[in-house]
Image: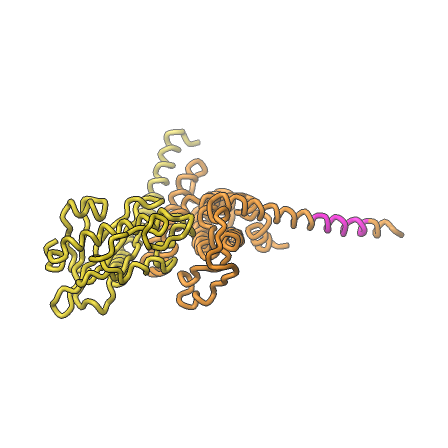
Amino acid sequence: MRSAPRQARRSALILASFAAAITLLLAGTWLATRAQVAANQSAARAALLTQALPAALFDNDLAASRQPLPEAAAWLLNGRAAANVYRASKAGRPSGVVFEAAAPNGYGGRIDLLIGIAADGKLQGVRVVGHKETPGLGDYIDQSVSSWARQFSGRDTASHRDWKVKKDGGDIDYVSGATISARAVAAAVGRVSGYFRDHRAALLQGNP
Amino acid sequence: MNNWQEISRNGLWRQNPGLVQLLGLCPVLAISNNVVNALALGLATTLVTALSGTAVASVRNLVPNEIRNPIFIMIIAGLVTCVDLAMNAWLHELYLVLGIFIPLITTNCIVMARAEAFASRNSVTEAALDGLMMGLGLTGVLIALGALRELAGKGTLLAGADKLFGEAGHAMVLHLAPANYQFLLALLPPGAFLGLGLLIAGKNLLDARQRRIAATAANPATHAVSQP
């Protein structure tokens, strides 16, 4: 007959050995997948940058050209203390920039964006890289769901001032019933283009 | 009817996790707003229920009764994490679609319920089949609910199929309503509750009719036997 303390010891041992075995399994899987996951993530980041700025516009390693924005600009454009800007160049001459930006006021909270602007001031691409908008409703801002974000491409950051949806008197299309998402992204694009307009030379020379 | 058919019928229809056991409602209600999401979550859940059934059944004789729940939880959480990591590494395209759903599978009570009620008491092959069939049963409900909500809400079917099937998926999308058609109620969470209610009612209706037919079929038979 087994006494209670002995039984408890036995249970504890079994539980501990299961925990150890599963920890080993997880550690093994993590080690086996780590390199591949990191490669996938950097490939995905490079692909995202290309969607914000057409590949024909640059020939440098965009992902490696990362530079931090000043803290005040990071708060303004990204809603956080840190944000990066990527500098594109073609044949050694600066050809554009990609901002890590965000709209802090989406329906579901923060909407992370990559915004590419060519050296001539024309918007090249607005790409939503992370959001929590309602699936099937506010998620049309995401390029994998609809082509909504493409309407920004080609707009001139120097002359365009009204970064508002049509409902608010601007000229940005939106889907009725999900205006908040479009309004938030449009305002974020407006902040980035204003910043580019004011700091164009410094940004292109690589000292933001 | 042999044991394997019995297990399959239970998972797919009689004990269907979505319509009868009503387990795992959190992911079912959240993800069923279109067919593609529903199919993707259903298949990922099926993989986890089949794996966890196999794993739990294969260690069932090593696990003392009083600490079986923490051990099962550990096994399930470990498996979900391994599936999550492996898909992130080797099925990255699919992971980008399913990524947010996979941790949700841990919250799906059906996995724990089958480990506790079935896998801990049956052989490894039976538990694997049970996990597979329970997962497929849930997938069926998810697809039906997803189709119902997508059709009523947006007038499309299989929108976003390219995320699962690659470029060929663009050709699979059916547009059955004008492009600007939208019925919000079906897309938002209340639509999931209403849709699931309709599906459960439909299943009960079918079952009731089956019983009635069986009863009328049985009566003449007993009558015939009593005749000389």
Locate the N terminus of chain A and report the quarter of the image it occupies: top left
**Do we see residue A118 in this rendering?**
yes
- At x 10%, y 55%, the residue is A207
The secondary structure that most of the magenta stretch takes on is: helix
Chain given the colour yellow: A
Is residue B213 depicted above or below A53 in this figure? Answer: above
User: Which residue in the rendered view is the most extreme toward the front?
Assistant: A169
Is B213 included in the stretch rendered in magenta?
yes
Drawn side of residue B42 relative to residue A123, left or right:
right
**Do we see residue A43 in this rendering?**
no
Is residue A142 depicted above or below B107 in this figure? Answer: below
Which colour assignment does the render follow? by chain
Query: Of residues A109 and B7, which is closer to you in this image?
Result: A109
Query: Of residues A113 and B70, which is closer to you in this image?
Result: A113
Locate residue B148, reporting x and y percent: 53, 53
Query: Of residues A192 and B148, which is closer to you in this image?
Result: A192
- At x 77%, y 50%, the residue is B216
Q: How many marks?
A: 0
Locate residue B117, reporting x and y percent: 51, 43
Residues drawn in magenta? B211-222
Query: Of residues B57 and A89, which is closer to you in this image?
Result: A89
- At x 21%, y 48%, the residue is A77
Is residue B47 depicted above or below A59 in this figure? Answer: above
Is B67 included in the stretch rendered in magenta?
no
Locate residue A52, reporting x and y percent: 26, 60
User: Which residue in the rendered view is the most extreme toward the top?
Assistant: A4
Q: Colour of chain B?
A: orange
